[in-house]
Image (cartoon, helix red, strand yellow):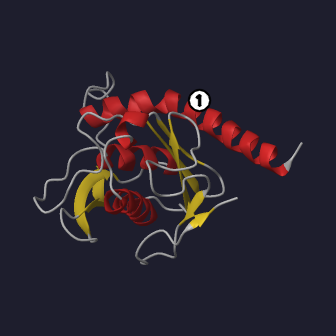
Amino acid sequence: MTPRTRSRLLLLLAAVLAAVLAARGWRAARARAAGTAPSAAAAPKTPLGPVSCYYPAREGFELVEEIRQLPADAAPTDRLRDVVAALHRPPERPEAAPLFPEGTIPRGVFLAADGTAYLDEPAAALERSLGVREELLLVRAIARTLLKSVPGTRALVILVDGAARHRLALHLPAHGKYILPAKGAAGPSGSEAR
């Protein structure tokens, strides 16, 4: 087996694992976010805490921070699901642009033991007319949000319809991990491409 084939098999395995695990918990997270979980009335109130979510500025290359209230004591994978669900909601601040088209629901999320967050998005969410600026800000906003709001996150892999792609939409390489910088730094430091 060639190294390239092995690498592709590992990415495929990660995508399948992410999809299976995410499918089990994603429905519950969506229901919880929408407030329609059947056990929500019987369950005790979960304390909420502030979480930083970042969105692209409508102009320039800056990110706009919004504070959202999410469950404070969630396990890391649940926290990841909650944060990603929050990023899929439009921002409230007028100077911030949404990351995804309205109504986009991620196909799944998974936090691996090594701190790699896998985010599987539908192709329609990324195959819209994204320029280099929008694509760069999309990755930076997701990366900064996860770095600041999901403890233990060290890298980001964005899958499209369950598979790795050579390019995310049209511009940025997406065939590796976006390695996240140390806490407090500006955004992903690059791609660990093979």
Where is residue 192? Give x, y as percent.
63, 64
Compared to residue 191, the image places residue 12 above or below, namely above
Query: Does the rendering let one see residue 86?
Result: yes
Q: Quadrant of residue 9?
A: top right
Nearer the observer, 151 or 172: 172
SS at mark 1 in the image? helix
Where is residue 3? Give x, y as percent.
83, 51
Density class for disc 1 (Cα within 10 Å; few <14, some 14-19, many ≥20) is some
Nearer the observer, 87 or 159: 159
Q: Quadrant of the N terminus?
A: top right
Compared to residue 96, the image places residue 161 above or below, namely above
Give, as a three-letter code, the residue at label 1: Val
- What residue is shown at x 23% (from left), y 38% (from top)? 102
- What residue is shown at x 44% (from left), y 61% (from top)? 143
Where is residue 135? Give x, y as percent.
37, 56
24 on left or right of 44 = right
Compared to residue 135, the image places residue 35 above or below, namely above
Read off the residue under disc 1.
Answer: 20
Query: Does the rendering let one see residue 43?
Result: no
Count of picture labels? 1
